[in-house]
Structure formats: C-alpha cells, structure tokens
Image: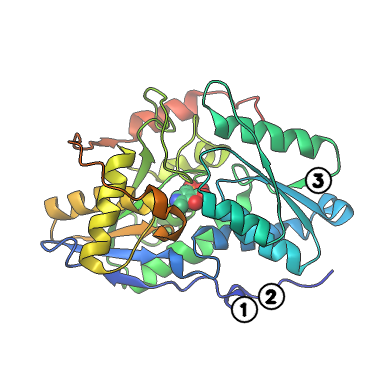
Amino acid sequence: MPIVGPLEAYGIGKTPLLRCASFAPTGRLFTKFEMYNRGGSIKDRTAYYVFRAAMESPSAIATRQLVESTSGNLGASLAVFAREFGFRLRCVVDPTIARAKIERLRGAGAEVEFVTSPDGDHRSERTRRAAELAATGEFHWTRQLANPANVRAHEETTGVEIYEQTGGSAAIVVVAVGSGGTICGVGRALKRRNRDVRIIGVEPAGSTIFGGTPGPYLTAGAGLRTPSHLLRQHGYVIDSFARVEDAMAIREALDFARREGVAVGITSGMTLAIARRISAARPDEVVVAIAADGADNYCDMMIDLGVELAEPTIVDASSWWAGQRARPEQSQPE
Ligand SMILES: Cc1ncc(COP(=O)(O)O)c(C=O)c1O
C-alpha cells in the first residue's frame, strides 16, 4: 500500500491567521482562513487524517471503496485522496448541498448519491444511508461523526497553529459546529496549553446540536439534529454556544468581504458574527474566528435579504454538557 505523505506535501495546513481591524475596529479579532488549504476548506485536514486512518483499515484495503455522508467539503477533499490512491468514493449528499460542490465532487471522480428525508432531517438520513452501504460489506465508511481521526486532525494541526500564530494569546476561539471534529480538536489542543481559553461553538438557527427547536436552514456544513458521537465524547471543551440565522451569517460574510477584501463562506459568516460581538465587548482579548471555507461555492446564495434580524445570544454550555453526560449512547449509527 502506498504511503500517504506528510500534510504539507498536499498543501494542507499552516493557513494564515490575520488581524481583521476593519471588520472589528475596536477589538483584537483574528481570522483563521481555511480556504487556503488545497481543496479550499478546513475539511482538507479531516480528509487527510481520516483517509490515512482508512489506509490502515482492513475493510478499506479489502473493498477499495469508501463511503461518506458529506455536505460537500469533506467529500471533495476525500475524492482527491481516493483518486490518487486508487479508491472509489461514494458521497451521500442531500438537497441543501451547494450546486458548485456537486460539480466538484463529480469532477474529482466521486459518485454522488442524493437522499432526502420527509421530515427535513436530511443529515440523519445521509448517515443512515452511509451505514446501510457500509453494512453491505462493499464499502469502508470513513464515519466523520464518530471517527477519532477527525478530532486528531484539528488537535494536531488547527489548534496547534492557532496557539503558535497568536503566541499563546488566543483567549476566545469561535468555531462552527457540524461533526464537531474542529471544535473538539481545537479545544483539546488549546486547553492543554492554556486552561483559561474559552471555546465558543456556533450552529445555524434550526440546528439542534445544543438543543432548541428544529427548523430548516440553508447553511451547509455546520448543524445537525443531535450532537455527534465526537461531541458527546469531547464536548466538555465547549464553554458557550450560539445560534445564527442564515440571513445574518450571509450578511456578516458580505460585510466581511467588503471590509477585509476576503470572500468567506456562510459558516464563516456565522463565526464572524459571534466573534465580532464578543470582540466589541472585550476589546483587550484576542478573539479568533475560524473561517472554514470561502464564498465561491455559495455565490448564488450570498444575497443580503435586507430583513431585520434578532441579535444572537451566547449561552453558557455547562448545562448542555451535563445533559450530554446524562444521556445514554444513541443506538443510531454514526
Ligand atoms: C464550511 C464548513 N463549516 C463548518 C463545518 C463544521 O466543521 P466540523 O465538521 O469539524 O464540525 C464544515 C464541515 O463540513 C464545513 O464544511
């Protein structure tokens, strides 16, 4: 089996972390620009780690077929590794996927399978379908919601980079939450080095990772109906959470592009909305927002609806975490 080279050999990691003084003039807000990974998103890091783990798995070696449930970014990145190492990849996606991402997946040689759920919980349906395909024995499921390699990717790279690039001064880090790999890995890396760092998770309004009432949302990548296995294991690193409406995420991303000259994606709009508010309230603290990808996949969605929006609230996560501790393991596969 060919050896997967070091991360740097694939143009992944060591992304820039830049001060954004036009977007947040009164504070010390820094953004980590993950669009500068080879495949254009933070999920390149995850793809590298889960692919490398798959290469050590007998079921992947035997079947040479991978399956993953994806909103597009992980799939696009995995597809490049799969092609290079002679694996087939089936990506299970849902109708909220950005159109440009479907083209990218197919262009990189992945098979794309659409699923929908009558109750709108497409993400759970994607997971169910990936589990079903894995159960046939014909596919190895990379299982991003439960794969420890997903957390390791960010614990060994993203989190360490944030610590080093801020000279250890990062006080508050704001992260969009989907599988939870980023927030758990970044949180673990930073808290090991500085116990006082605060980690803030952001989900789209309508997502119920942190509770609340389920509803529709457009923001792809972040959001789930229930916390992933990774979050139930490592969610203790999360100090607070917030929910951001699609319209606010888009408005903030557009405003960021206008002020800073970098077009970030919709989940980046979510993290920046919260980071900007925290930074205004705590101007002396170094606040880091992770911008998970760029706007190019979402150009047709990036329109300010001009509606009035409620201010998001930032909620202490300790009761959420106590609730997770008390919950039995889910029977649904991840
Ligand atoms: C654009 C974007 N933002 C945020 C996330 C959430 O990251 P994680 O799955 O590590 O929680 C993803 C995950 O796919 C994503 O694609």
Residue 131 visible in the displayed image: yes
Callout 3 secondary element: loop
Callout 1 secondary element: helix
- Is the CB of mark 3 within 8 Å of ligand 1? no
- Is the CB of mark 2 within 8 Å of ligand 1? no
Residue named by callout 3 = 139
The answer to whether marks 1 and 2 mark residues whose Cβ atoms lie closer than 8 Å is yes
**Separation of residues labelled 3 and 2 (CA atoms):** 24 Å
Along the line of sight, the residue nearer the viewer: 259 or 232: 259
x and y percent of residue 265 in the render? Answer: 39, 55
Q: Amino acid at mark 1?
A: Ala
Along the line of sight, the residue nearer the viewer: 86 or 304: 304
For image coordinates 27% across by 56% down, the residue present is 254
Q: Quadrant of residue 239?
A: top left
Residue named by callout 1 = 9
For image coordinates 78% across by 67% down, the residue present is 85
For image coordinates 36% across by 24% down, the residue present is 212
Q: Is residue 149 left or right of residue 227?
A: right
For image coordinates 50% across by 69% down, the residue present is 37
Label 1: few (<14), some (14–19) or many (≥20) C-alpha neighbours in 10 Å: few
Residue 181 visible in the displayed image: no
Label 3: few (<14), some (14–19) or many (≥20) C-alpha neighbours in 10 Å: many
Question: Which disc is residue 5 wearing?
Answer: 2
Q: Is residue 30 left or right of residue 89?
A: left
